[in-house]
Amino acid sequence: MSSADPTFDGAYGSYTITAADRDEVRRYRIALLVAGLAMSLGLLHWWQIGGSWAWIWVVPLAAALGLALQWIHIYLRPLHRALQLFWLLGCLGWAGLLLIAGPAETLSTLREQPLWILAIGPLFAALAGIGFKEFFCFQRPEAIGLTLLLPAALLGRLLGLINAPVCLALLESAALLLVLLALRKFGMEAAADVGDKSVFAYLDGQQPAGTP
C-alpha cells in the first residue's frame, strides 16, 4: 500500500484500494472479456463451420471463467464457493462428454442428446451467477440479459421447449452480452468492483477460528 492509494469510508470502517486490488480487478475484467469472446466465437464456429472443432473454444471459455471466479469480489464466501463448485462440475461434465463422445462428435452429441446439458450446464450456471452479481451491484441491462438468456436457452432445450437453432441463437446473444458487459466495465473505477472492503473484513471476523 502506498500513500497515493485512495481511502474510503465503509460500513465497518475505512479501507484502502491498493495497487494489488486494482490489478486484480483488471485481471477479472480481462478474464470476463476472454470468456465472452471465446463463447461468441465458439458458437459462431459451430453455427457457420460445424461442430467438429468448435468444442476447442470451451477450453479458453472454461479457463477464463475459472480465473474470473478466482478474482471476483463477492461478500458472501459460501456463494463464491458455490459458483466455483458449479464451474468445476461443468468442467468435469465437458471432460466426460469429450471422453465418451470423442472430440469430433462432442457438439453433435450434445445437440442430439440434450440430457448432456445436465452435465455441462453447471459451467453456464456459474457464468449466469456472475451475471446476476453484476446486475445486483451495477444494474446493467446486459448483465440481467446474460443471467436470463443462459438458463432460458439450456433449460428450454433440455425440456424440449425450443429447438437447437433457437438454443444456439439465445446462447450467442448471451455471449455477446457478456462481451458488452466486460467492455463496459473497463471504464469503471476499480473501487466499484472491489466494493466495500470493510464488509469483507467484518465477515471474515465472524468466521470461526481455522475457517479457510
Image: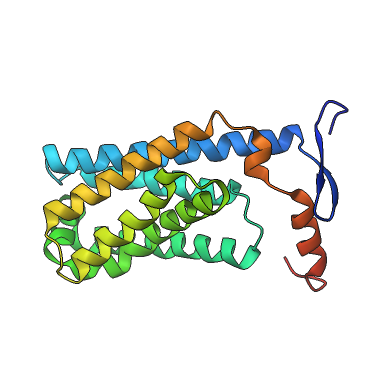
Taking 198 as reference, is 81 left or right? left
User: Which of the 4 quarters of the picture holds residue 121?
Assistant: bottom left
Rendered residue at 83%/72% (across/down): 209
Residue 135 vertical position relative to residue 202 in the rendered view, above or below: above
Rendered residue at 15%/46% (across/down): 51
Foreground pick, 45 / 201: 201
Rendered residue at 80%/61% (across/down): 202
Foreground pick, 31 / 150: 150
Taking 197 as reference, is 114 left or right? left
User: Which of the 4 quarters of the picture holds residue 54?
Assistant: top left
Residue 68: image location, x then y, percent: 52, 46
Residue 38 vertical position relative to residue 93 in the rendered view, above or below: above
| Quadrant location, the N terminus | top right
Foreground pick, 38 / 73: 73
How is colour applied across the structure in the image?
rainbow
Residue 97: image location, x then y, percent: 26, 62
Taking 23 as reference, is 180 left or right? left
User: Which of the 4 quarters of the picture holds residue 172?
Assistant: top left
Rendered residue at 21%/71% (across/down): 115
- Total number of numbered labels? 0
Residue 159: image location, x then y, percent: 19, 72
Residue 41: image location, x then y, percent: 27, 37
| Quadrant location, the C terminus | bottom right
Q: Is residue 91 visible?
A: no
Q: Is residue 184 visible?
A: yes
Taking 14 as reference, is 59 left or right? left
